[in-house]
Image: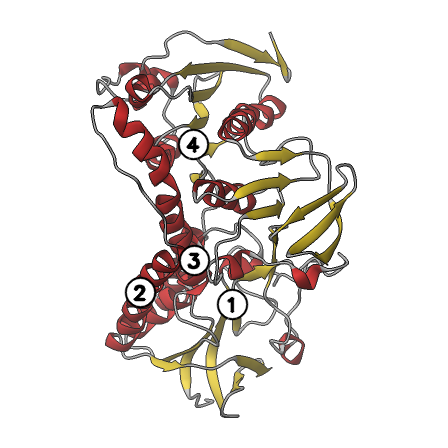
Amino acid sequence: MTAYDYDLFVIGGGSGGVRSARVAASLGKRVAIAEEYRYGGTCVIRGCVPKKLFVYASQFPEHFEDAEGFGWTVGKSSFDWKKLIEAKDKEITRLEGLYRKGLDNAKADIFDSRAELVDANTVKLVKTGQTFTAERIVIAVGGTPNEHKALPGHELTISSNEAFHLEELPKSILIAGGGYIAVEFANIFHGLGVETTLIYRGKEILSRFDHDMRRGLHEAMEAKGIKILLTDVIEEVRKGEGGLNARTKNNGTLAVDTVMLALGRDPNTKGLGLENAGVKLDARGAIIVDDYSRTNVPSIFALGDVTDRVQLTPVAIHEAMCFIETEYKNNPTKPDHELIATAVFSQPEIGTVGLSEEEAGAKYPELEVYRAQFRPMKATLSGRTEKTIMKLIVNAADREVVGAHILGHEAGEMAQLLGITLKAGCTKDDFDRTMAVHPTAAEELVTMYSPSYRVVNGERV
């Protein structure tokens, strides 16, 4: 029997990697984990968590304005970007410390170094040159922003990584992309007083989301003053007088302080030595895995964004727990990627779970669609014209709710609870039998008794 240095070696200190390492170590396994940047991964260090903190910061101007409608007099306000960055950095450092503490308490060995594969059971630490053998290796190195190197002048742009560390808040910014990262940062920068333009090659922002959510958010963003350029792309970025000049295909040259590219994320597999172990990748560079997160090499597994299955932090954690159940608890468990609730922390938010109307229309012969649009109570005294949209997609044959979509305040919080409901296979009758909580926006979900319209063979009737 071969003697290995470790039972498990994890490459990557993000959510999936840390969870698999910590839990395996707590089970008494000999575990090591290596991370070249900071523990916590994209989500904690330069993703979900700091982004949400920035979202909160960007909402205060509207809160100050709304206060007057409720009888408050708010004095002159000002914003200090450097103070926000300092406070954010302090919180991220605290969270990283908790990740490290959890690993340390579980008695996992922690390495602050890039790790690369030497072969199917051997890992090398780049910083020290040390090599270690392991019975199992987990690769959980996440993704990285697409640099879009084909764009002339791409080196003058920033990605979401750099957006969290800008020394100065720009006066104007052009953001390329139409996905949730682009949309969220457009709202963040606008809320912080930056003149913001979003440019996207598609016909509408947020592809794959329900059309009503996409259109509703688009209108809300433009009403706030965010400029959105659709069916257009940046063709070149050059240095200009005091800033940058971005030449676009259809809208001429735009002079801005900063250009941000939010054009998707790629699996972070370059230079990992995967070829040394014979690990197979797909056309996008993602590690190919089976239903149990196994690669084609029996000793090597991959979790999270590096597999390009579903790029969400909770999914990586879920995949890690399934790995533990399968490999160390003799309980083969496949990750469940169906009906994943998600949120776009735009302003207003989008919370969604299940099929969009368009997807459901292609899958089911007939749908009942329940749709409500209303002014939220908070907006009545503040004087805002914003609208909340709620939508339930129901399969007419068995009345099962197959999609739920919300645009409005706290949509993400509601989507989490709706995720449980749809996962349980609840029907519209179950919604109808549920008593409303009044006065709330969420009560609309259980008081829409009659379909707004039907969809037959993909067409509204």
Residue designated by label 3 = 43
Give the distance between the C-alpha atoms of the residues marked 4 and 1, in whole angstroms. Answer: 32 Å
- Quarter of the N terminus within the rendering: bottom left
Residue at image mark 2: 90
Label 4 with label 2: CB-CB less than 8 Å: no
Name the front one of labels 3 and 1: 3
Marks 4/2: CA distance?
27 Å
The quarter of the displayed image where residue 322 is located: bottom left
Which amino acid does the dot numbered 4 rest on? Pro
Q: Secondary structure at mark 4?
A: loop
Q: Position of residue 420 (x, y in %)?
A: 34, 35
Between label 3 and label 2, give the one nearer the viewer. 2
Quote the CA–CA distance across marks 3 and 2.
Answer: 16 Å
Q: Which is nearer the eye, 455 or 46? A: 46
Q: Which residue is mark 4?
A: 348
- Left or right placement of residue 194 versus residue 429 in this view: right
Q: Which residue is mark 1?
A: 141
Quick one: label 3 or label 1, which is nearer the N terminus? Answer: 3
> Do callouts 3 and 4 mark residues in contact (Cβ within 8 Å)?
no
